[in-house]
Image: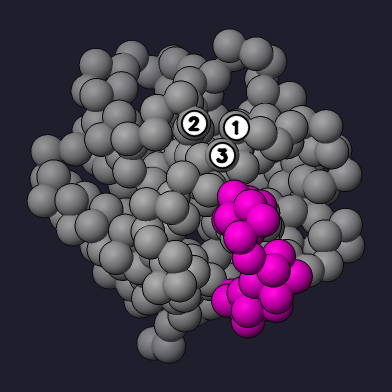
Amino acid sequence: MPITKPNEQRVRRRDEFSWQHFAEDCLHNKYILVVGSEAVLNRTYNSDAQGNSMSLLLQLAKDQLVNNLGDYVDAELERSRLGNCDNFNVLSKIYPKDKVKKSVLDVVRDTDFRQLFDDEIEPSLMQLLRTRCFRIVITTAVDPYLEIAMEKVWGKGGYDVLHSIEDAQNKFRHVSCDEFGVSRPVLCYVFGKVDSTKPHERFVLTENDAMYKISAWFERAMSNEFLKKVKTFQLLSVGSQFDDWMFRFFWFLLRGEVNDDN
């Protein structure tokens, strides 16, 4: 069976798909929403980022790095040099990794993401969240947009934010479930969350970061209550490319195989 890619707009299930059954399952809280960075932003509002919040974060981080260089360099020349730097792997080869991480932390600290949120966020993502059918949301993004979106849906203090799968392990070890499946809505940043108040927390920017995270997940997978909980749900994945090897690793962790239609 060929690998099914989300951008082919297929639904990965074993049985014959029915929109009616899908809607009923969502209403009965049988699905977890998995949100990748490519589904976060409105593509028409920020054409350069193409809907990808990580791409926007990269743009802002590059500007922050250039601004921090001060008057000792030609800012326009430096921006031109960084023009073809299209991911954090490349950026971390040009600048020391600690400086890149600090620039990202500074961007999140200094940027008011709420000011333009209604314009920047992807409308279809907000429509999904506003159904309130997904009380567990997993995101592979690291930026603040999903947290703001959850607050708009559930209200301030009406949901829990987990900065990692390790945090989720502690949360779900003693969780008591209600008729909807969980006691409170939960947003889990599985690749870490950029938080300027906790600069020492590890969040994923480069492939090396991702490999560190993924290897740590596999080491703890058998005893992780959060992962056990996830495996009892169906998954609706948006904004993640299945031909991305890192996402396939992540999917394997959640499902045990990558060619499974479930």
- 250 on left or right of 134: left
- How far apart marks 2 and 3 lie (CA) works out to 7 Å
Residue 109 has which mark?
A: 1
The magenta stretch is: 64-86
The residue beneath circle 3 is: 106
- Whether 142 is drawn above or below 87: the answer is above
Please state which amino acid type lies under the numbered disc 3.
Answer: Asp
Q: Are marks 2 and 1 in contact (CB under 8 Å)?
A: yes
Question: Could you say where residue 231 lies in the image, as x and y percent from the top left?
Answer: 31, 47
- On-image quarter of the C terminus: bottom left
Residue density around tag 2, few if under 14, some if 14–19, many if 20 or more, within 10 Å: some
- How far apart marks 1 and 3 lie (CA) works out to 5 Å
Residue drawn at the location 33% of the way across and 36% of the way down: 201
- How far apart marks 2 and 1 lie (CA) works out to 6 Å
Query: Magenta part mainly helix, strand or loop?
Result: helix
The secondary structure type at the circle numbered 1 is helix
The secondary structure type at the circle numbered 3 is helix
Please state which amino acid type lies under the numbered disc 2.
Answer: Ser
- Whether 155 is drawn above or below 39: the answer is above
Q: Are marks 1 and 3 in contact (CB under 8 Å)?
A: yes
- 251 on left or right of 110: left
Residue 196 has which mark?
A: 2
Nearest the viewer among 98 and 214 is 98
- 3 on left or right of 150: left
- Whether 172 is drawn above or below 234: the answer is above
- 1 on left or right of 158: left
- Whether 213 is drawn above or below 176: the answer is below
